[in-house]
Image: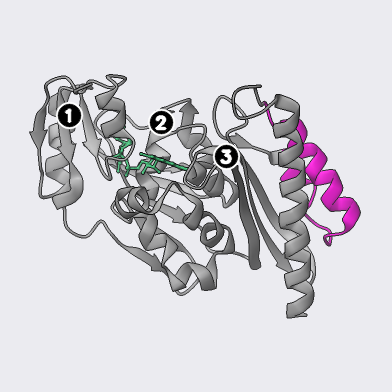
Amino acid sequence: MYPTRFNYESPKSIAEAIALLHQGGGEAKILAGGQSLVPMMRLRFAAPEMIVDINNIPGLDYLTVDADGTIHIGALCRHSDLEKSSLLMAHQPTMAAAAPVIADPIVRNRGTLVGSLCHADPQGDWSSVMMALGGIVVAQGPNGRRSIPAADFVKGPFQNMLAFDEIAIEAIVPAPKGIPNGGYLKLERRVGDFATAGVAVAVESSQGLIIRAGIGLTGVGGSTINATAAAQSLVGAPLTAGSIAHAADLAAQAAQPRSDHRGSASYKRQIVKTFVVRILSGVVESMERAA
Ligand SMILES: Cc1cc2nc3c(=O)[nH]c(=O)nc-3n(C[C@H](O)[C@H](O)[C@H](O)COP(=O)(O)OP(=O)(O)OC[C@H]3O[C@@H](n4cnc5c(N)ncnc54)[C@H](O)[C@@H]3O)c2cc1C
């Protein structure tokens, strides 16, 4: 199927892009990597009157780490930039684990992390990763910039908290207060597929104790799930077999999976539990190696 007719705009600055979105009055859409928007348009699930292609705005493709460890991911930083980043390998294990399992290499070459957050697909991998990390989305509109926690950014399936004339400029992972650790595991039917279930775990430790934890769940609910009770249960104590099993149980309880062609609800819940145990057991091993 072909998309409906639309006007194509290619602004050269953020201000110009915001003005175009404002002019579009809710009928304009940003094009970043196009890996979700174009398929949606071809299937006519989306029929914007105007496409605002941000790919010719200079300076949005950055991936930087501040001296304190804060990570900034610009709106045009591609999945493949994250996959190849030695900065992430060194500083952010949860993101480093997720980047290579997003879709396939062709999609990763064009698609962006920020676009993925904006798309708010319950099966999108980056939303759960950013939730686990306590990430932030920086939005810019006619009235300036504002920061939205990743945990609040997803309003529902395929819905985000941006106003119609706002652009997500960057995603930020706040500086860790302890040693960052964690991982991302995803069960897919075949390489390149969306998640049957995925689990993102991010912890920070100091002197053997967990001082911060986040757990995000992919593909096991109507939108990405922030398993806060499971994450909180880990804080203030060392990781033990008992605390890991308890957190895994709480994460499985937080999941709201539905039975479908990818598997039954109880199977998906079991995957969540198994993945939390696997990731946290890996964290224990790496903490023991580092000690
Ligand atoms: C075959 C295939 C397999 C895939 N598999 C996976 C997978 O396994 N896991 C996964 O997570 N994703 C998967 N994806 C989706 C992919 O990750 C997309 O790249 C991502 O969802 C959207 O990023 P994008 O830059 O391509 O955004 P686009 O497609 O350009 O935009 C998506 C939506 O976000 C909005 N948007 C984009 N950027 C901004 C911005 N800066 N500010 C405001 N709004 C914005 C657009 O208007 C649009 O509504 C797959 C896609 C394909 C085609």
Q: Residues within 10 Å of mark 3 (few under 14, many from 20)?
A: few
Q: Which residue is pictured at 61% across the width and 22% down the height?
A: 260
Q: Amino acid at mark 2?
A: Met
Q: On the image, numbered disc 3 is attached to which residue? A: 189
Badge 3 element: loop
Q: Residues within 10 Å of mark 2 (few under 14, many from 20)?
A: some
Residue 22, numbered circle: 1
Q: Is residue 219 left or right of residue 120?
A: right
Give how far apart the Cα atoms at labels 2 and 1 are.
Answer: 16 Å
Q: Which residue is pictured at 76% across the width and 46% down the height?
A: 274
Percent position of residue 202, x then y: 64, 55
Q: Which residues, given as a range, are shown in magenta?
A: 229-256
Q: Is residue 253 left or right of residue 219?
A: right
Q: Which residue is pictured at 82% across the width and 52% down the height?
A: 244
As displayed, is residue 189 above or below residue 289?
above
Q: On the image, numbered disc 2 is attached to which residue? A: 161
Q: Residues within 10 Å of mark 1 (few under 14, many from 20)?
A: some
